[in-house]
Image (tube, rainbow, N blue to C red):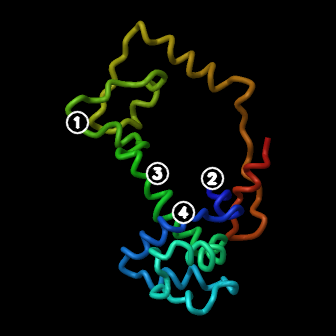
Amino acid sequence: MSLHYYYAGLEDDDLILAFKCIFNSDNAAAEYQAWVQYTPALSSSYRQLVGVNLDDRRNCTENIFPALRASKGAVDYFLSHIVFHREMKSFPHKLSASGWDIGEIKTNPTVGFSGTNDGKKTLPLSVYQLVQAEQNHTNALVLSYLLRAENFVVSEPDQVKPGSSNAILFLELN
């Protein structure tokens, strides 16, 4: 989704949203300078935020928006302050947990997971293990899932250059 905005540019409605957001920000002038920094097609009269009047829609769509549509600064601002800001709010609760989060003392305690009874020494102190005979077969199920043919081990490749990321190398491994 992000690449779409970088390649296709922002629509007029996207720019209006971004402008409304920037007008309400504490550091609007500096933010706008990042938008116009590499936009030589933008007239000098619109290089300062005070020169932009959203009420004059025709002027915006003919003189300002075409120059800012593909501005990396404008797209960055739009994504971080509007798109990602809105999307992140759709998950009001934490989506991940570690063993310690799971073991946190709470009203309804965690009761256990299949295939975990061999790791009781690694469980948080507040979690105790309850072994039930009717659940013993789940350990073998977990092991059979791990040993499937589609699961494999890949050694980490050597770094291309020190301090660089191996993310691309990992993605290319099969």
Q: Is residue 63 above or below residue 110?
A: below
Nearest-to-viewer mark from 4 and 3? 4
**Quick one: SS at disc 1?**
loop
For marks 4 and 2, give the CA distance.
14 Å
Q: Quadrant of the C terminus?
A: top right
In the rendered image, residue 23, in percent from the top left (x then y), is placed at 40, 76
Q: Nearer the viewer, residue 89 or 169?
A: 89
For marks 2 and 3, give the CA distance.
12 Å
Picture quarter containing residue 66?
bottom right
- For residue 106, the mark is 1
Q: How many marks?
A: 4
What residue is shown at x 54% (from left), y 68% (from top)? 15
Q: Nearer the viewer, residue 77 or 49?
A: 49
Residue at which label 2 appears:
1
**Which of marks 3 and 2 precedes in the sequence?**
2
Q: Residues within 10 Å of mark 1 (few under 14, many from 20)?
A: few
What residue is shown at x 76% (from left), y 54% (from top)? 169
Q: Nearer the viewer, residue 153 or 91?
A: 91
Residue at which label 3 appears:
87
- For residue 14, the mark is 4
As shown in the figure, which amino acid type bears the numbered disc 1? Answer: Lys
For marks 4 and 3, give the CA distance.
15 Å
Q: Is residue 52 above or below residue 99?
A: below
